Image: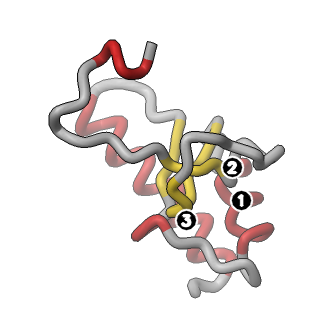
Amino acid sequence: TLPPEEEARELRESRARLEDLLGTRVDTLAYPYGQIHLDVAHRTSAAARAARYRAAFTGNHSPRNTARDFWMLNRIDVSMDESPEAFA
């Protein structure tokens, strides 16, 4: 777990690097290794909000998102053989 100031800096700087590299805006975040510990969940999601991410994804895999917090969303498993029609 990083100190709050370092966590906020990493969120801002990594976003800026990705935007420079990709040449497009980065609006979403996937927490490292998909894990977010409950004891830091609120602080980390608040830091993601402060860094102006529109949403963030945890390591919880489920097609349903019951979270009311857009910075604590579940991930959906997608395999290489999935077609775009599977998401329609």
Q: Position of residue 48 (x, y in %)?
A: 65, 54
Graded by Cα atoms within 10 Å as few (under 14), some (14 to 19) or many (20 or more), the crowding at tag 1 reads many
Residue position for label 3: 9
Q: Is residue 69 left or right of residue 55?
A: right
* Quadrant of residue 79 within the rendered picture: top left
Answer few, some or many: residues within 10 Å of disc 3's Cα (few below 14, many 20 plus, some between 14 and 19).
Answer: few
Q: Which residue is mark 1?
A: 45
| Tag nearer the camera, 3 or 2 | 2
Residue type at tag 3: Arg
Label 2: which secondary element: loop
Q: Quadrant of residue 63?
A: top right
The residue at the point 65 percent across, 79 percent down is 37
Label 3 and label 2: CA atoms lie apart by 17 Å
**Vertical placement of residue 86 versus 48, above or below:** above
Label 3: which secondary element: helix
Which comes sooner in the sequence, label 1 or label 2?
A: 1
Which sits in the foreground, 67 or 46?
67
Relative vertical location of residue 21 with respect to residue 33 in this rendering, above or below: above
Label whose residue precedes the other's in the sequence (3 or 1): 3
Horizontal arrangement in the rendering, residue 73 relative to residue 76 (left or right): right
